[in-house]
Image (tube, helix red, strand yellow):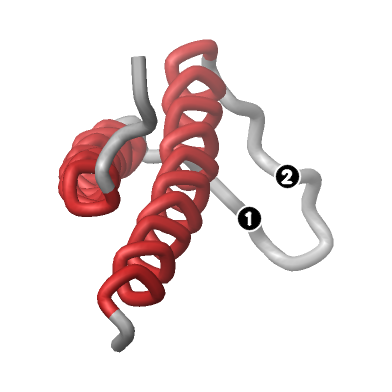
Amino acid sequence: MGTERPEHQYHRARLAFITAVQDLHAAMHTWIAAEVPLYGPTGAPLPGWTKEQYDATAAAAAAWQELVRRRKAYQSALRILREGSGR
């Protein structure tokens, strides 16, 4: 098999990035709904987290990482597309 055409690579990377944005939106919605406490009263111990709150936080963190990874792939595909077209 040959290499993928830059146009196809670009469109695939763009779609993957948009999907990552949607996944992040869903993960953040879940995180907000979990009401994860981030700080407590001054001088008091930080509030504990439930398993649901840990899981929601971990899922949101993973979604952010995937968004960054997909954005880098998109930027790379865009650069290759532009270099190939002379723009």
Residue 80: image tag: none
The answer to which quarter of the image holds residue 60 is top left
Q: Return the residue found at the far bottom.
A: 87
Q: Amino acid type of disc 2? A: Leu
Q: Position of residue 65 (x, y in %)?
A: 54, 43
The answer to whether any part of residue 33 appears in the image is no
Q: Position of residue 63 (x, y in %)?
A: 42, 37
Residue located at (66% from left, 61% from top): 41
Mark 1 in CB contact with mark 2 (< 8 angstroms): yes
Residue located at (32% from left, 75% from top): 82
Instruction: Answer left or right for 73 relative to 46.
Output: left
Where's the N terminus, which quadrant?
top left
Instruction: Answer left or right for 10 relative to 50.
Output: left
Q: Where is residue 7 in the image (x, y as percent from the top left)?
A: 19, 52
Circle 1 SS class: loop
Front in this rendered view, residue 87 or 18? 87
Instruction: Answer left or right for 33 relative to 39.
Output: left
Residue under pointer 1? 39
Q: Amino acid type of disc 1? A: Tyr
Residue 46: image tag: 2
Front in this rendered view, residue 83 or 32? 83
Q: Return the residue found at the far front.
A: 2
Circle 2 SS class: loop
